[in-house]
Amino acid sequence: MNAKITATGAYLPEKIMTNFDLEKMVDTSDEWIKQRTGIEIRHIADKETTAELAAKAALDILKNSRLSASDIELIIIATVTPEHPLPATALFVQEKIGAYNAFGFDINAACSGFTYSLSVANAYIRSGMVKNALVIGAETLSKIVDWQDRSTCVIFGDGAAGVLLEAVDDDSVGVLDMVLHSDGRYTDLMIVPAPGSRYPCSEEVIKNRDIYIKMKGNETFKMAIRSIAGVSQEVLDRVGLNFGDVDWMVSHQANRRIIEGVAKRVGLDMNKVIITIDRHANTAAASIPLALDWAYKSGKIKEGDIVLLNSFGASLTWSAGVIRW
């Protein structure tokens, strides 16, 4: 059995923060943000939680599918901003949508979280353990962004999106293969130090602002293009395809310059690259499924298309997958 994407769905909070709004908060400008990142707006979850965003995305997926919540067998939520340290955000989503016949858990692989989660769901389906799975990336990064740090607060946004994977008796369609990598030598490139077992919550960690994202942007940028291009070539080689066979590349929407750099490095025309970072910023694990949902619903991605997914995540994860839609 292969795992095929049969429906997509998404949800973005109503509140929008523009680059001009950020100009009033930190020393930055609309022109600088657009030139350096490609971002124009980001959505902010004022009162909504990660589970609430994910549940609304899940309901959109189900609305676009032939299944009901009671049919779902597995729920995986990719997130770095969980509802609570425990229990898993997936359980809150399960309750909110009424998917009581499913089991669920979370995966934290930073911005590679969706592709990691997709690979896990794919393995469950190919093994025969389940016949379907909801795979959702959901983030409320605005809640862990330091709004005094201009190097990070302009980059991130909130949102949720995902896909329904179903078992199909056709090995020519669906998830053809996926490749995952990580390297723990680079944990300092991007990190939220506290609270955790190393730095439990205390007055000191709050004073040091260690509860917020800390990122070494230049180092991350330099590694991203090379890593994404390399893992994309690796997964295409595994399925006997090349970049000329790719109809669409859907990358983690971290920075427009990174995506353009990858396309240039592998010789892929930008007309085959999905770009959505301008309208929702970097939403970590939610960014690839948000881009997929937009591309599919807008009619760009069609049945039979070869779609290359690739990602690069903090500290350090990178991955790629090939899907025949």
Image (cartoon, helix red, strand yellow):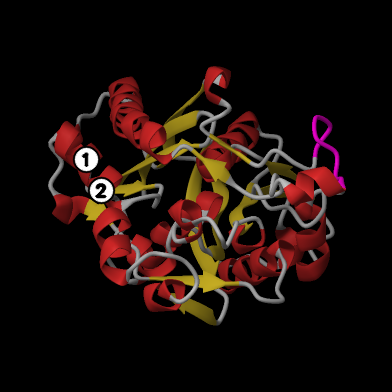
Q: Does the magenta stretch include residue 199?
A: yes
Q: Is residue 20 magenta?
A: no
Span of residues in magenta? 196-202
Residue 264 locus on image (x, y percent): 15, 39
Q: Mark 2 points at which residue?
A: 257
| Residue under the point 38% across and 70% down | 279
Q: Is residue 297 above or below residue 209?
A: below
Residue 204 locus on image (x, y percent): 81, 44
Label number found at residue 217: none
Residue 290 locus on image (x, y percent): 46, 61
What secondary structure do most residues of the magenta stretch adopt? loop
**The N terminus sits in image quarter:** top right
Residues under labels 1 and 2: Cα distance?
6 Å
| Observer able to see residue 168 | no
| Residue under the point 76% across and 61% down | 93
49 sits left or right of 44 in the view? right
Q: Mark 1 points at which residue?
A: 261
